[in-house]
Image (cartoon, helix red, strand yellow):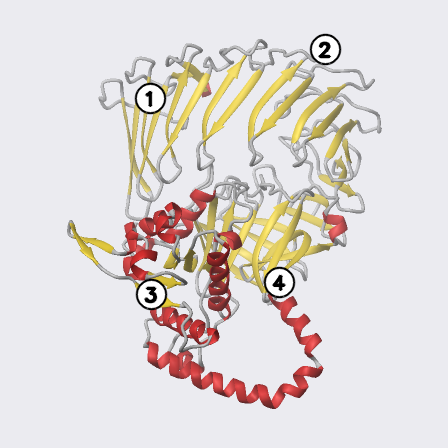
Amino acid sequence: MTDREIIYNYDVFISYRHLSSDKKWAKWLLESLETWRAPKELIKKGFPQRIGRVFRDEEELSTSSNLSKSIEKALIHSKYLVVICSKDTAQSVWVEREIKIFKELGRFDRIIVLLIDGEPNKSFNKELTFIEENGAIKETEPFYADVRNNKFQKDKEIKQTALIKILSCILSYSFDYLMDIEKSRYKKKLKNSILALLSLLIILSSVSFFIWDYNRIKTEYYNTFVYQYGIPKGIGKLTKKQYLKRNVSYVFESKRGILKQVKRVNSYGRLRDDRQNFNISVWIPNIDINGEAKRVICKDHNDRIVMIREYSSNLKIIEFKNEFNLPFIASGNEIIRYEVEYNKNGYVTNELYYRDLWNTPIANKDGFYGKIYEVDKNGAVTAEYGINSDGDIEENIYGMFKLQLSYDSKYNLIKEEFFDNNNNLIYIGDHYGYSYIEKEYDKNGNLIKKSFFNENKQSILSNYFGSASIVYNPNNKGNITNIISYDENGKLFLIPYIIDNFITYCIHTMKYDNNGNIIEGAFYDVNTNKYITGEIYHKYRRKYDDNDNLIEESYYDKNDNLIICDSNYSIYKRKYDENYNLIEESYYDENGKPTIQEEHYHLAEYKYDKYNQITNKKYYGPSNKLVLGFYGFNSKFADTRIKYDRIGNVIEERYYDDFNNLILNSKNYAVRKINYNDKGLKIDESFYGTNEELILITDTYDFF
């Protein structure tokens, strides 16, 4: 990866040992760099007003569960490395590792040392004393600033000199010139300070409070958020008391008037991924000195970058990228670029979808090439329309022309309505089975009831949810402890078996751990008797790792004994790699022994490339041997191998049997190869048999 491909999220990365003296200097350097402002003389020459974000692990990774991986990512995305060196630094394995990584990135010339005590030849880590060029080792001495005590300078002067020396390297500007400007600025400040001393003494307490308030992290709580000119903006403000009693809230953290991040958390402060929004739970905006959005980095609860919303200079183009600066392509969604229009308040009212950087139009899963929105004064969408390739509003496949949304004063969504092109309520039978939904909330904003109605405003049994109304009972932390279903007459209702809802029940109870994760659920009928669901179990239990990832689920009968569920197993287990990619799924019977589940395998194993793209799926039996399983449309194979091009398009897929021989899938091909043009558009695909001979295919289906 070249530097041109790197997104520099940090201007400076501070590397140091976690000893009290080293930490003190690291904190001083971070605050000094972040608060330094360029003189007018430099700004006129095109220099930035201030240094950008500075990385120090205790500031940036307080909630990270994988420090090693997070630090490596931060190094990759840092422009300069400052190493704080003391007498103990030379023995630090962590500091040495960080220097090595930066050197391997080809940035040795961007390494700066801050010497806080000891002598250079003993305090410098050995990695700072040499560089390899063309296979030869060349001794060198790093650029360093010195803050050791000496009898010729006061502490303040020593710090100031060191800071200017570091800034001269970062800005690539003359140290003497910067020092002269800084001295001149200091004298001017001193003169003004003396003149204003009396006034400052009078208002000292107010100023002190203001400085403290300005520099601290400010936290605000909201029900949801919208984008205003590309930057997240909270709506439906909550009190802290409400936040502590809600299932999910959005926490906005700001410092010095700049939004640092938005977190989607539960009442325990644990991150909760938004399943309707690519499983994102953290939004980190990068804002330039003019207060305009450059990008928004979106992460999940595992601190993985899910995608990056990159904005053009006029904010009208939004590109979706992954952490490797490649196009972000989600399952079932190949839209990587939006073209948007804003109203006078900065909220998006129109968007068009593109599949590549050349603005090739593409439809979403509903067949729309874009959308038109009506928004209120705070940016909340009140109506939504889909548009065709000509830019005209059209109905979706169910005949819906407009989706209308209504909110209460806290921006809880209280009604969703489907309208036709004559502005009449329309009943959508397929999939939905209703014309509109009404929702009710408690005083803290937790959903407590959902009801379904037809076009005549009559209560109706929905197709998707089964019942006519659903009541949710949250506890004092906002966790739903039970869900109860009712029919159109308000009576307890046993949800029947329907294609989109395999779990039939009337009452669903739930228990939680101390992080707000569901650890147990049970089902009951209209008489509150224990009930065996359509998936043939009464109760389930779940276990999680330290980062709230599901690692085990098990199923039980009415007597609390393990039971084989409808999918032919009792226990389901998961394993993850260091990047939290799912690498293994396995199944066990009621005795805890390996078993074959309904798709005819015991264990599925997944492998990924360096871009976290799945490259291999293998399926094993209880004896740990490859087996043929049954997958979509009865396709049988034991091993799937997938290749991608540089922007993440699948260019080859191969299917193998349990003896490592190519095997035909249900569409009667063993190998598929796809070619794309320079715009990333598919131009052809070819199919091959088990001997890699070209074969004729009339229809295709992707199994990976």
Around disc 4, counting alpha carbons within 10 Å, would you say few (fewer than 14), some (14 to 19), or many (20 or more)? few
> Residue 648 location, x and y as percent?
36, 41
The alpha-carbon separation of the residues under discs 2 and 1 comes to 43 Å
Q: Amino acid at mark 4?
A: Arg
Relative horizontal placement of residue 496, taking residue 18 as reference (left or right): right
The alpha-carbon separation of the residues under discs 2 and 3 comes to 71 Å
The residue that label 3 is drawn on is 144
Q: Amino acid at mark 1?
A: Tyr
> Residue 518 location, x and y as percent?
66, 30
Around disc 2, counting alpha carbons within 10 Å, would you say few (fewer than 14), some (14 to 19), or many (20 or more)? few
Check contact, mark 1 vs mark 3: CB within 8 A: no
The residue that label 1 is drawn on is 655
For marks 2 and 3 on the same chain, the one whose residue lies earlier in the sequence:
3
The residue that label 2 is drawn on is 559
Q: Residue at x 72, y 40 (%)?
A: 436
Q: Amino acid at mark 3?
A: Tyr
The alpha-carbon separation of the residues under discs 3 and 4 comes to 31 Å
The residue that label 4 is drawn on is 216
